[in-house]
């Protein structure tokens, strides 16, 4: 019986670790004017950053114009690969 409980604990630890890894891919988008959005960015075009909002089973994709973005940071505080360049923001 102790083996069964040990396997359950190991399984739960694995699930928690996997879930934590999935959440680590979100970025924080700082909007000019003070708003902050934490979301998973899905695409960057020349003028728009697209991010994913999830509510239960529904997923919505939202775009924000790059000129309205101050900066984008990864969860660890480093600059995101989606961060707008000075040239993009100046447009």
Image (cartoon, rainbow, N blue to C red):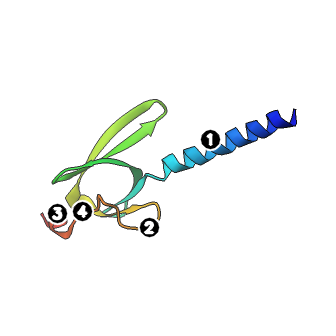
Cα separation between marks 4 and 2: 16 Å
Foreground mark, 1 or 3, reads 1
Q: In the image, is residue 84 above or below residue 23?
A: below
Q: Earlier in the sequence, mark 2 or mark 3?
A: 2
Q: Earlier in the sequence, mark 1 or mark 3?
A: 1
Residue 84: which numbered mark, if any? 4
Residue 15: which numbered mark, if any? 1
Q: Quadrant of the N terminus?
A: top right
- 5 relative to 21 in the view: left or right: right
Identity of the residue furthest to the left in this view: 91
- 42 relative to 66 in the view: left or right: right
Residue 88: which numbered mark, if any? 3
- Where residue 38 sits: x, y (%)? 42, 53
Q: Residue at x 17, y 53 (%)?
A: 47
Q: Quadrant of residue 82?
A: bottom left
Q: Residue at x 75, y 41 (%)?
A: 9
Identity of the residue furthest to the right in this view: 1
Q: Earlier in the sequence, mark 1 or mark 4?
A: 1
Disc 3 secondary structure class = helix
Residue under pointer 2: 77
Cα separation between marks 1 and 4: 35 Å
């Amino acid at each position: 019986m102790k083996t069964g409980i040990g396997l359950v604990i190991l399984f739960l630890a694995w699930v928690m670790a996997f879930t934590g890894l999935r959440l680590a891919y979100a970025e924080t988008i700082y909007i000019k004017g003070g708003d902050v959005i934490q979301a998973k960015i899905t695409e960057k075009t020349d003028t728009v950053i697209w991010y994913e909002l999830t509510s239960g089973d529904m997923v919505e994709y939202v775009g924000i114009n790059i000129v309205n973005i101050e900066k984008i940071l990864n969860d660890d505080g480093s600059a995101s690969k989606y961060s707008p360049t000075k040239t993009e923001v100046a447009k």
